[in-house]
Image: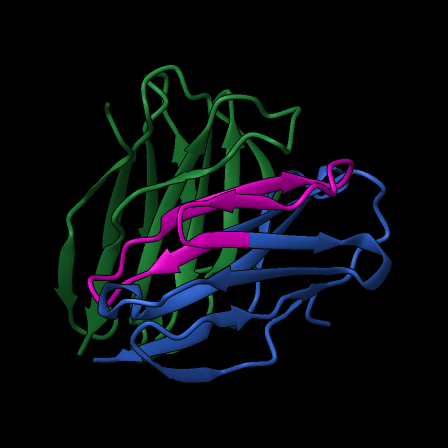
């Protein structure tokens, strides 16, 4: 079965550079979530989209922005990267915004290292 | 405030022993969902179980079992006859209907099964 695809899987950037992470949800899933997991920490919710509109916002820094496109894939844009942005970034998708019961299917994550 | 508390940071057991991972949650919603995820060293989040707030039945799946008690706001996870492959970080998560379905993760319990 198709899963959530994230690219790239690994990314190395210098401080103050920009990075773009991509997420391709499971086909027919209309909701995408982004999470950030720092080293030794639990995943923290950043932002979510439903039907290409931002639906909820968590602890996402102002330097970050995200959007969901017409094909439902999503991109997380990160500018002026800082050392503290080094983390594992997860994308998750689900198929029914109105029902929490729907499991969020997580992608394999993108490991970002900022040097 | 942490909505999900996993008091056990690290646990070590000898292979074939049983182990219980504790999870205590906090919510004012009457409708919510609880999850357990496994994160092996490779980093991906592996879905284990989903439980909604109206279903307090315990569940068993092979060597895994879950005990959901609303009276104590707990959703504990037991691994019977542990195996080395069970070594991973385990996260408990809460999803509330009124919070846009984002996941609140606990801080995780790192389980090491010693051969």
> Above or below — where is B10 with respect to B17?
below
Which image quarter is the C terminus of chain B in? Answer: bottom left
Q: Nearer the viewer, residue B40 or A53?
A: B40
Choose top left, top right, bottom left or bottom right for residue B1: bottom right
> Above or below — where is A18 with respect to A102?
below
Choose top left, top right, bottom left or bottom right for residue A24: top left
Which residue corresponds to the image point at 40% horizontal and 76% vertical from the top-left?
B110
Task: Indicate left or right for B19 with B84 as reference.
Answer: right
Q: Locate residue A87, reporting x and y percent.
A: 31, 68
Q: Locate residue A52, reporting x and y percent.
A: 47, 24
Which residue corresponds to the image point at 41% horizontal and 53% vertical from the top-left?
B63
Task: Indicate left or right for A2 with A29 as reference.
Answer: left
> Above or below — where is A100 with respect to A112?
above
Q: Is residue B111 magenta?
A: no
Q: Is residue B64 magenta?
A: yes
Asked if residue A41 can be seen in this view, the reply is no
Figure chain in blue: B
Which residue corresponds to the image point at 82% horizontal and 63% vertical from the top-left?
B72
Q: Locate residue B71, reporting x and y percent.
A: 86, 58
Drawing shade for chain A: green
Magenta highlight range: B37-65
> Above or below — where is A75 with respect to A95?
below
Q: Nearer the viewer, residue B64 or A20?
A: B64
Task: Indicate left or right for A112 with B45 as reference.
Answer: left
């Amino acid at each position: 079965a198709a899963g959530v695809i994230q690219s790239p899987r690994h990314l190395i950037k210098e401080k103050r550079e920009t990075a773009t992470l991509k997420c391709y949800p499971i086909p027919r899933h209309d909701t995408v979530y982004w999470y950030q997991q720092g080293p030794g920490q639990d995943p923290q919710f950043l932002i979510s989209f439903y039907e290409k509109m931002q639906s909820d916002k968590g602890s996402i820094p102002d330097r970050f922005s995200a959007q969901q496109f017409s094909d439902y894939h999503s991109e997380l844009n990160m500018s002026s990267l800082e050392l503290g942005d080094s983390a594992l970034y997860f994308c998750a998708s689900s198929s029914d915004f109105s029902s929490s019961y729907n499991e969020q299917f997580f992608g394999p994550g993108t490991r970002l290292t900022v040097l | 405030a942490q909505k999900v508390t996993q008091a056990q940071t690290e646990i070590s057991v000898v292979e074939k022993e049983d182990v219980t991972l504790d999870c205590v949650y906090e919510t004012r919603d009457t409708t919510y969902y609880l999850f357990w995820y496994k994160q092996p060293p490779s980093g991906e989040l592996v879905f284990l179980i989903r439980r909604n707030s109206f279903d307090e039945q315990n569940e068993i799946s092979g060597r895994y079992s879950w005990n959901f008690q609303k009276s104590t706001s707990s959703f504990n996870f037991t691994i019977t006859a542990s195996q080395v492959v069970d070594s991973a970080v385990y996260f408990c998560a809460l999803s509330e209907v009124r919070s846009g379905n984002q996941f609140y993760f606990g801080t995780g319990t790192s389980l090491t099964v010693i051969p």
